[in-house]
């Protein structure tokens, strides 16, 4: 008998029928003798619908109020799942984020979890009840409802698993594991039985849609055993995310390819080429709580230089406007950007021991006449920023070039 945290995403609870299926899966784990804590997302499409409604009220919805609205999606699914379980004779109780005291900071719409009180959950488990917790939400240090960022239910699940010291955290989604790349884009993509945390972190942060990055960070930090599986099909063990030290597999150079359209490029042109400029620009962006990803500064000519970086697409307009306000104090000649770009990343632990991976990427893209706008690398990753219209093509040719179909 084990303590298992199961998380079901929006597609898995996307209809009454699917919620009943989830109830059956939970009942099965109970029947096998496990204690189960379930975390659910809102029904698929619901959070987007709520975001759109909020934008009808305000161009930039008030973050506190936006969280009040967004958190309702998950409140619906926890209640429905509790009913579905009771209907098949399984004792269960639902809780919102604040009811289980999932405490966060005050960064509305992207709050970070600070602590979780497991008392209530433990009491329910001891009484033989399934505990159902609303994903994606908590209560801020100021007592307000706060959400954890899109896809945040994954993080809720892993955080609960860590707090409860669960034996396994199972993330049920609409794919049966982590793939070499998005199979909807590249039909030859295949499921990986295992992937290391380091790789998963790169793949998740690079926009692989399977898991929210914070959930992987959390799992790595607290050594949560994390598995991704399908809620829509049976008979697969999904993908287990392993710790590098436990993983002694012989690795190919490349494990997977991630694509990310949530990118926008900002160019700050003709800034004085002197110490402090990068800080002036990026410090202001960081102060606005906007995450900067890729950065390049060109070699200056005639005392000025161009500075480019990427931000999440949702922060594109805000970044442009805050930099335009600073244009004179920075001394920039021009500020512009492009929000029709995407990032394609090639990831693999094996890169540490294989040379020539970057060159092969550049050659492969060149053969398709795909222009590279920015490049960034780490020990186990090479990313390129390209025009979003070439995203699928790039993923396909790179997948082939690294023989990931095998
Ligand atoms: N419902 C939220 C979203 O759509 C959280 C989640 O699904 O994980 O982003
Ligand atoms: Mg999700």
Image (tube, grey):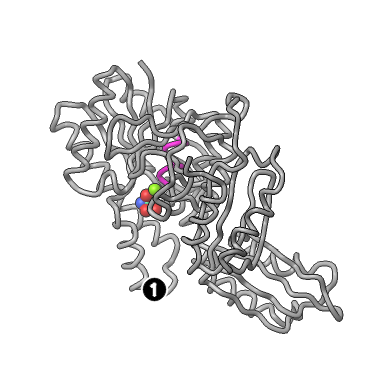
Give the residues drawn in magenta, as a range.
Answer: 152-159
Residue 169 vs residue 338: left or right?
left
Q: What residue is rendered at 56% in x and 34% in y?
A: 196
Query: Furthest residue to the front?
Result: 367
Residue at figure coordinates x 56%, y 60% from the top left: 343
Q: Is residue 25 above or below residue 107?
A: above
Task: Looking at the picture, tell me which residue is in the foreground, 47 or 114.
Answer: 47
Observer-nearest residue: 46 or 116? 46
The quarter of the picture where the N terminus appears is top left
Mark 1 crowd level (few <14, some 14–19, many ≥20, 10 Å Cα): few
Q: Residue at x 54, y 68 (%)?
A: 341
Q: Position of residue 191 (x, y in %)?
A: 43, 39
Residue at the spot 21% in from the left edge and 31% down from the top edge: 24
Q: Is residue 313 magenta?
A: no
Picture coordinates of residue 251 (x, y %)?
60, 34
Task: Give the left or right position of residue 307, taking residue 62 as reference.
Answer: right
């Amino acid at each position: 008998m084990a303590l298992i945290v199961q998380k079901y995403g929006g597609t898995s609870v996307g209809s009454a029928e699917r919620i009943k299926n989830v109830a059956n899966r939970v009942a099965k784990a109970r029947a096998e003798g496990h204690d189960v804590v379930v975390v659910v997302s809102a029904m698929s499409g619901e959070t987007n619908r709520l975001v759109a409604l909020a934008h009808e009220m305000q161009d930039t919805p008030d973050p506190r109020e936006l969280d009040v609205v967004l958190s309702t999606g998950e409140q619906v699914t926890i209640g429905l799942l509790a009913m579905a379980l009771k209907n098949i004779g399984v004792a269960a109780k639902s809780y919102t984020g604040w009811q289980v005291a999932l405490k966060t900071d005050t960064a509305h719409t992207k709050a970070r979890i600070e602590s979780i009180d497991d008392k209530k959950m433990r009491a329910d488990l001891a009484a033989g009840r399934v505990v159902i917790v609303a994903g994606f939400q908590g209560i801020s240090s100021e007592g307000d409802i706060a959400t954890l960022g899109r896809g945040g239910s994954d993080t809720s699940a892993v955080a609960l698993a860590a707090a409860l010291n669960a034996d396994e955290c199972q993330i049920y989604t609409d794919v049966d594991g982590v793939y070499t790349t998005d199979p909807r884009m590249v039909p030859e993509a295949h499921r990986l039985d295992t992937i290391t945390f380091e790789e998963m972190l790169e793949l998740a942060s690079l926009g692989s849609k399977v898991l929210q990055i914070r959930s992987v960070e959390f799992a790595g930090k607290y050594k949560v055993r994390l598995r991704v599986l399908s809620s829509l099909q049976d008979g697969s063990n999904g993908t287990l995310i392993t710790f590098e030290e436990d993983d002694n597999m012989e690795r190919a150079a490349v494990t997977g390819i991630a694509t990310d359209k949530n990118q926008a490029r900002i160019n700050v042109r003709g800034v004085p080429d002197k110490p402090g400029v990068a800080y002036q620009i990026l410090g202001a962006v960081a102060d606005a709580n906007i995450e900067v990803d890729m950065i390049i500064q060109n070699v200056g000519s005639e005392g000025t230089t161009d500075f480019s970086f990427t931000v999440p697409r949702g922060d594109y307009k805000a970044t442009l406007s805050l930099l335009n306000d600073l244009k004179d104090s920075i001394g920039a000649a021009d500020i512009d950007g492009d929000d029709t770009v995407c990032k394609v990343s090639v990831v693999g632990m094996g890169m540490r021991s294989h040379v020539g991976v970057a060159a092969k990427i550049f050659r492969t893209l060149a053969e398709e006449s795909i222009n590279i706008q920015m490049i960034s690398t780490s020990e186990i990753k090479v990313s390129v920023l390209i025009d979003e219209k070439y995203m699928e093509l790039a993923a396909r040719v790179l997948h082939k070039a690294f023989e990931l179909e095998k």
